[in-house]
Amino acid sequence: MNCSRKSGFIIAFAIFHCVTQFCMSSELQRLTDDGRMKFTPIFIKDGKELMYVDFEDPRVFRLKTMQWDNKSIKPVHDPVSAPEFDPAYSKNGKCFCFLRAVGGLQVALFVRNTQDNSEFKIDPLPGFSGYRSPAVAPDSSLVLYSFAQNGAQDIYAMDPDGSNRRAITGGKGINIWPSFSPDGSSVVFTSTRDGNYELYSMKPDGAEITRLTNSPFQDIRATYSPDGSRLVFTSHRDGNAEIYIADADGSDPVRITNHEERDDYATWHPDGKSIVFVAERDGKHDLYQIAVPSR
């Protein structure tokens, strides 16, 4: 290759590299900049707000909302009486669940009717006990949650008034992080029933449990896309926590983040074109938004 052709190749490659890097960076938008630990972001009110858990100081996990149009942030409860975790909202906006610490090692489940602001609490059992990862059916007809008892961690279902509580995952392994499909006909969840954290689906009553992923490392925290055709989840299959998208049956997984630090807790934007997730960058944790590949 002569010098002029080689120089032209180098220049063209440099331009291509710069354009590629610009396009990649333009897809990733940082939403917060305080660097504090954050968890479980969810869109509510038809995408007008983003709710998440902020580790505000060494003693307080606090629920906060971000107005999506101007990115202003405010606490959900002010003042906050105890650490709060794991918000869950129904698609129709009528039911809101969250967890709150009620003792040193105990966590209670709160269920709120957003129409009249009435609320009830499900207390934990005595000793080291607590609820985890609530989920609400799109029409507010059913509440799911994870609860450990007698050496197993099941997913339970109950009516929105707290009645008719029953285990639905069979008491095998750890069963956690349920999430409803947009039409309410299916639930995706994480289970160790086959020896490793994998993704499974089931009917809301616990029927037809089907394994979706098969990885030697953890696949966790999946949620359905707004049209129900895809999943976003966290996987360690490439060595550390990264965000993946797959079809709703677990097939064709595609990695959409690539960083040596942790990417986790992904949630779909209501338009289905992007996700928001918690990213660790230089030891700090913030919310980021990234476009997802189209089909």
Image: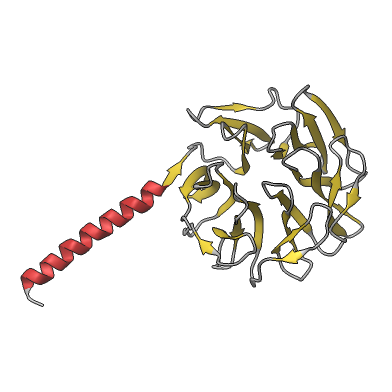
Task: Tell me the colour scheme of the image.
Answer: secondary structure
Tell me what residue is drawn at x 65 percent, y 55 percent: 222
Instruction: Please tell me which residue lies in front, 33 or 227.
Output: 227
Above/below status of 88 relative to 94: below
Tell me what residue is drawn at x 59 percent, y 26 percent: 74
Taking the image as shown, residue 289 lies to the left or right of residue 172, namely left
Q: List x then y, in percent, for residue 152.
A: 86, 59
Q: List x then y, in percent, for residue 98.
A: 75, 37
* Res 249 → quadrant: bottom right
Instruction: Please tell me which residue lies in front, 164 or 76.
Output: 164
Instruction: Please tell me which residue lies in front, 228 or 211.
Output: 228
Above/below status of 48 relative to 214: above
Above/below status of 57 relative to 258: above
Q: List x then y, in percent, for residue 47.
A: 57, 35
Tell me what residue is drawn at x 81 percent, y 38 percent: 109
Tell me what residue is drawn at x 80 percent, y 47 percent: 145
Quadrant placement of the N terminus? bottom left
